[in-house]
Amino acid sequence: MSADFGSELDGQVAIVTGASSGIGSATAESLASRGASVVLAARREDELEELADRIEDTDGEALVIPTDITDDDDIDSLVEATLDEYDRIDILVNNAGVMPLAHIAQADRETLQTTIDVNLSGLITLTHAVVPTMIEQESGHIVNLSSVVGRFLQANSSHYNAAKAGVKMFGDSLRLDVAENGIHVATIEPGAVDTELLDHIPDEEIQEGVKEHVGSMDALAPEDIARTITFVVTQPERVDINEVLIRPLDQVQP
Ligand code: NDP
């Protein structure tokens, strides 16, 4: 018998949320380069179309579905359009996220709500919409983007930390329910990754402080996380990588 060193993704279908930039964009490219048809979901359609062009230029297959992950109708349309086009869903990368850091006393309610809606509620709702298809197929991978701060404390981040810790607990508990259906669940916990995530921190002082902290280290590239996610979903069927904490070598805080 020959050794089993994992699989390619030919014939598989992957939905990647937050595919318009950063980690999601790199992950979609990586999965497509291994043979998956990738469904690109986020709000910015132009960025998704550019990514689809890049993927198709290298003989990959991509479908653009503009999606606001906080909108239940968009979530249903995303799943329906995927099934209409490909008739299956093998991989769901729940990557869409926002990080509007703020001190709780200075944050407005909309900021708090959006943080939970995008990072946690949207992820749970989309998973809920996809799982029946995976159960029917008796296989699947759900990869959820948590964060190093889902495990460790960070100032001015109580709402974001809560959302990311929720992602981790959701994934671990989900696994109990769906492992018997052949569905793999993984939580990815990146440290500092060089993306546009920090640019959207509304409080200038906090944004500057975080950028200084991240700038003091050799931050990860989105491709580093994309490679990790691709590794997670190309293991032999019996392997279920549950959790990956991945930080720049020189990140020791948090
Ligand atoms: P980016 O800001 O580059 O990407 C965030 C993505 O989320 C964008 O594609 C954005 O697309 C999408 N998004 C935001 N709001 C919505 C929404 N309402 N509906 C659909 N999509 C939405 O950041 P990263 O690539 O860094 O972030 C990806 C994930 O990684 C996030 O979950 C983040 O929390 C996590 N992470 C990042 C770390 C880092 O250091 N960068 C560290 C740890 C975790 P659009 O605006 O077009 O909708």
Image (cartoon, helix red, strand yellow):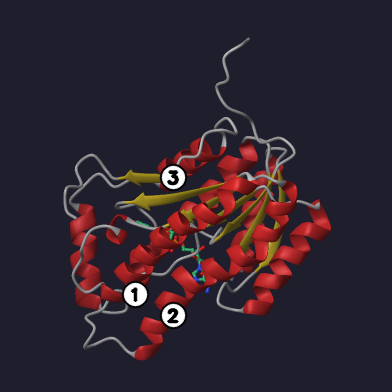
Which is in the foreground here, disc 3 or disc 1?
A: 3
Residue drawn at point x = 54 percent, y = 32 percent: 235
Residue 42 is at least partly visible in this image = no
Q: Closest to the observer: 193 or 241?
A: 241
Element type at mark 1? loop
The amino acid type of the residue labelled 3 equals Asn
Which residue carries the number 3 mark? 242
Which residue carries the number 1 mark? 100
Residue drawn at point x = 22 percent, y = 54 percent: 215
Q: Estimate how packed mark 2 is, as few (under 14), some (14 to 19) or many (20 or more) residues with alpha carbons within 10 Å.
A: many
Q: Which mark is residue 114?
A: 2
Q: Closest to the observer: 187 or 52?
A: 187
The answer to whether the residues at label 2 and label 1 have Cβ atoms under 8 Å apart is: yes
The amino acid type of the residue labelled 1 equals Pro
The amino acid type of the residue labelled 2 equals Thr
Q: CA distance from mark 2 to mark 3?
A: 27 Å
Answer with mark 2 or mark 1, whichever residue precedes in sequence. Answer: 1
Residue 228 is at least partly visible in this image = yes
Q: Closest to the observer: 168 or 14?
A: 168
